Amino acid sequence: MGSQEGTGLRELERFEHAMRIAQAVSTNPWAGIPGTAPEVLEMPESPDLPAPESNASGPSSPGESGLVLQIPDFCLVLLVGPAGSGKSSLAARHFRPTEILSSDRARAWITDDEAEQEATADAFALLHRMADLRLAWRRLTVVDATNLESAHRQQWLAIARAHHAETVALVLHFPLSLVRERNRARSRQVSQKVLDLHFGRFHAEFPALQGEGYSYIHILEDPHVVETLTLSRVPLPVDRRQDPGPFDLVGDVHACHGELVELLEKLGYKVAPDGLQAVPPTGRRALFLGDLVDRGPEVVQVLELVMGMVEAGHALCLPGNHDDRLMRALLGRPVQTLHGLEATLEQLNAQGSSFRERVLCFFKGLPSHLVLDSGKLVAAHAGLRADLQNRDSKRVRAFCLYGDPTGRLDSDGLPERRDWVREYRGRATVVYGHTPVATAAWRNNTMNLDTGCVFGGRLSALRWPEKELVSVPARQAWCESPRSVWDLEREEPEGGWFGL
């Protein structure tokens, strides 16, 4: 066997080995690491380190000295462009050295030579694992490689999805003449043949970018814009760790307006005579855990009160599965009008289109969950495991709305759910609702505040950080319980459990 053929076979074996690792990472991020398990994901949050700042109001805006792009402070950033387009320079200007995963540097780590192309497959196997671990620790990660081919980019996207991380593509789309000029100025030049190959591959694969599933794509075509660019990191919508409260967390209201007014008054809120506005005690805010609608008698009044409090800055709110189903109905999507939705829609329709549009906009703007008070408190309608907290994805949102399904059906033909609380060992206190219980009680640093008001139980609130439970009795049973108070909510999400 000739040396060239042998080298080709070794490179193929290394490439196949790297692909096996990448596939394992995409399906099981802990594959191949002895002694690790999913619960290891309960990790500390990112330290407060310097990061670019800006007053920009959107994902991109003109700054005083150039373009300002906003990116999530937890995400995977892919730099895309041929050799010589300035990816490494861009990365060095805007990211910490520890955040940058460089293919050149990985080849040097392995062989002491960043130009050793035979080490490329091994280098990417190493980078895939490093990205996997960084995202598990909830650290922003930047991939400094050409990333020219869609198949290779998809491997990075799979790793990001496994950790519920958003993805950003920063694409350097410059003319070939400029890339050639920059290449000539580099200390380590790429051959003209390789450069032309890169450029051709880049343009051939460029159209695929839009359909690959990035959270954000920024295409940069002006070198001056790149030189004066500012990258501003913004927290995810669920991340309100800088908000210490204090809060009054309120369980499932289900259109029980009278009981909600009584509870707010018991908590010290000043409620307007019509019951449609409430002002909290100085410094406090309410935090509604979702399921404002359905089953109870006064949907419109509850919505008016809660939306008014949120708009006035007196409250925060999360969506429940009933609220989410109402939102989908208002969007015109097919939903089953069960569990009180038909009556809810009748009440909303009587208010006219402007009120329905206001309700729709309100629910569309709610985050899946909230991380508060320096990470000490997590609020979610159906609760949230530690490894999903302060992350945002379709799966995270489904857990927040419905809990943790097994994918199986129980003896009643309804989706079976895991008891996530039994295994919870997270640092944050989790306060939630969704599944009615007879009494709110502490269990593994969590509390369920849905005490079945609409079924004749109580409407409950938890004062934070005091951890004081406050409740009022239901005025009556507004809705007949379809089964034991211990297990009432088992609705299936849009698209089914297996579609998540």
Image (spheres, rainbow, N blue to C red):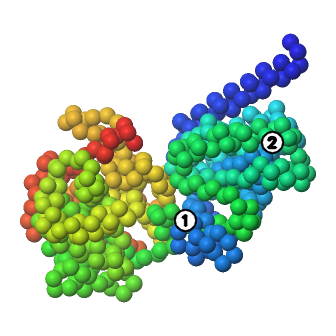
Examine the rendering and report whether any part of residue 454 can be seen.
Answer: no
> Quadrant location of the C terminus?
top left
Q: Position of residue 189 (x, y in %)?
A: 88, 46
Q: Where is residue 355 in the image (x, y as percent from the top left)?
A: 22, 70
Picture disc at residue 195? 2
Dot 1: within a 10 Å radius of its alpha carbon, few (fewer than 14), some, or many (20 or more) residues?
A: some
Q: Give the residue type at disc 1.
A: Pro
User: In the figure, residue 103 lies in which quadrant?
Assistant: top right
Q: Position of residue 391 (x, y in %)?
A: 49, 56
Examine the rendering and report whether any part of residue 323 can be seen.
Answer: yes
Picture disc at residue 206? none
Relative side of 356 to 104, left or right: left
Q: Where is residue 99 in the image (x, y as percent from the top left)?
A: 70, 56
Residue nearest the viewer, comparing 337 with 99 = 337
Q: Give the residue type at disc 2.
A: Leu
User: Of callouts 1 and 2, which one flags the residue occurring earlier in the amino acid sequence?
Assistant: 1
How far separated are the C-alphas under marks 1 and 2? Answer: 32 Å
Q: Name the secondary structure under disc 1.
A: loop
Which is more foreground, mark 1 or mark 2?
2
Relative side of 262 to 12, left or right: left
In this rendering, the answer to whether 205 lies above or below 391 is above
In this rendering, the answer to whether 244 lies above or below 19 is below
